[in-house]
């Protein structure tokens, strides 16, 4: 539990700093004047940005993922007007437009609904596997073509139930329709997209509520766990979850007059001139530091936010288990070869702009069998001391969360979280 203002985590997020908000706030706000600007180049789920904004800091929140930038836009109130004060009105716009059947999918939805009501997990697993999907058709695995759809033709029966996929894509289509008709403004658009992603995160059929890959069905393995879990996940009502998330965002989001910023931007492309132009005095960075690419864990949410079906990656004649897009962002921070250069660039940009750098990082104790770091802590400290005159470490007495099922967690893994603080003077 945190002792500061409540924040809203829109989705389950790898390495979320929800438990670290108090020490992060203490380090950044204690020495910073209220109203000073913090640049957060890896905003992720936006929870740190929300806490710092609540503490009186001005945030410039960036991320390589459009979905993460959208969460920050919604939660920081970027573009929010005084008229944007009633969540019920926005929900009303969505609900009034939500009409019609599911066309060519109607019969399949009815069959799935019956299995959900009866709690028949075995039937749900079989139903999902039998659905026509465009990637099955492309590979000759299904003679029946899947009807076109942003999610239903690609992720139904795996990550989502068919009804869930259809309802999520219908909600997403309404966002574009209401935008074209100027019935919602840019902030409301971000709010609805954030809420849709939140509902998708709750509904997804995966071990850690991420999108690296859905739970796998093995013909020669007991499916008892999967049968129980799929019933729970398929019963998630994505429409009501979207509406509830909209209500939460309206309550938790900042006011538009605070002048926060949020956008898609790559940390490796930002310059010290950019930071000086925005009067940045502190850089708070929580970069990836293992081979785990975030574009792998949240690619379906990227499709939802962008509203464009993904061109799927095919390897050796097969789509990937996670149904990944062919072109997805690969962070240099996840590469042992590129990470040292990326971290040095970040440090030099901050120092040249006259800003201190606060880095969230996680060590890996000797003997731990967790994911190896793309740059070891000792090398990172040495690199930072080449740039900044003062560098010290704040221990958080926390461990990096293992982002998989409890059965697969490694009891011998030890990944203590720290804050590395680099000062210009």
Image: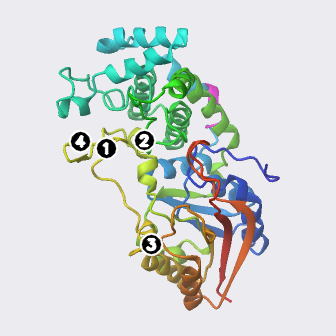
Given residues 9 and 186, the one toward you in this image is 9
Spatial CA distance of label 2 from label 4 is 15 Å
Task: State if disc 1 and disc 2 touch (CB < 8 Å).
Answer: yes
Category of crowding for the residue at label 2, using alpha-carbon neighbours closer than 10 angstroms: few (below 14), some (14–19), many (at least 20): many
Q: Which mark is residue 213?
A: 2
Q: Where is residue 408? Give x, y as percent.
A: 56, 45
The residue shown at (49%, 32%) is 205
Spatial CA distance of label 2 from label 3 is 32 Å
Residue, disc 3: 270
Category of crowding for the residue at label 1, using alpha-carbon neighbours closer than 10 angstroms: few (below 14), some (14–19), many (at least 20): some
Q: Tell me if residue 392 can be seen.
A: yes
Look at the picture and state if 94 lies above or below 175.
above
Decide whether the magenta segment is chiefly helix, strand or loop: loop
Label 3 or label 4, whichever comes before in sequence order: 3
The magenta stretch spans which residues? Answer: 84-88
Is label 2 or label 3 in front? 2
Q: Which mark is residue 320?
A: 1
Residue, disc 4: 318
Is label 1 or label 3 in front? 1
Given residues 308 and 129, the one toward you in this image is 129
Q: Is residue 385 left or right of residue 217?
A: right
Spatial CA distance of label 2 from label 1 is 9 Å
Spatial CA distance of label 1 from label 3 is 32 Å
């Amino acid at each position: 539990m945190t002792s500061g203002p409540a924040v809203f985590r829109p989705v389950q997020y790898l390495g979320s700093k929800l438990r670290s908000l108090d020490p992060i706030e203490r380090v950044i706000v204690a020495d910073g004047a209220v109203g000073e600007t913090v640049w957060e180049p890896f905003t992720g789920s936006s929870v740190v940005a929300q806490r710092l904004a609540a503490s009186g800091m001005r945030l410039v929140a960036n991320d390589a993922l459009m979905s993460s930038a959208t969460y920050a836009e919604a939660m920081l109130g970027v573009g929010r007007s005084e008229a944007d004060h009633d969540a019920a009105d926005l929900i009303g716009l969505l609900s009034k437009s939500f009409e019609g059947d599911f066309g060519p999918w109607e019969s399949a939805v009815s069959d799935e609904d019956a299995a959900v009501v009866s709690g028949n997990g075995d039937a749900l697993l079989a139903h999902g596997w039998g659905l026509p999907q465009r990637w099955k058709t492309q590979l000759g695995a299904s003679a029946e073509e899947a009807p076109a759809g942003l999610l239903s033709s690609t992720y139904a029966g795996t990550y989502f139930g068919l009804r869930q996929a259809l309802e999520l894509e219908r909600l997403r289509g309404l966002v574009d329709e209401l935008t074209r008709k100027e019935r919602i403004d840019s902030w409301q658009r971000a709010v609805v997209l954030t809420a849709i992603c939140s509902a998708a995160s709750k509904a997804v059929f995966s071990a850690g509520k991420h999108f690296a890959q859905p739970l796998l069905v093995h013909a020669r393995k007991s499916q008892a766990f999967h049968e129980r879990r799929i019933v729970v996940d398929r019963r998630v009502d994505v429409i009501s979850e979207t509406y509830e998330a909209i209500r939460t965002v309206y309550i938790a989001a900042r006011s538009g007059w605070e002048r926060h910023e949020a956008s898609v931007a790559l940390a490796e492309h930002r310059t010290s001139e950019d930071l000086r132009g925005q009067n940045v005095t502190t850089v708070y960075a929580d970069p990836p530091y293992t081979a785990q690419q975030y574009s792998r864990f949240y690619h379906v949410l990227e499709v939802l936010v962008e509203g464009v079906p993904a061109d799927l990656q095919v390897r050796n004649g097969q789509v990937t288990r996670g149904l990944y897009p062919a072109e997805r962002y690969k962070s240099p921070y996840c590469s042992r070869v590129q990470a040292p250069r990326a971290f040095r660039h970040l440090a030099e940009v901050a120092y040249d702009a006259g800003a201190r750098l606060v880095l969230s990082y996680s060590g890996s104790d000797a003997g731990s069998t967790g994911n190896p770091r793309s740059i070891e802590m000792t090398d990172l400290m040495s690199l930072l001391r080449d740039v900044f005159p003062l560098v010290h470490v704040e221990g958080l007495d926390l461990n990096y969360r293992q982002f998989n099922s409890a059965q697969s967690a490694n009891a011998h893994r030890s990944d203590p979280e720290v804050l590395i603080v680099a000062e210009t003077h």
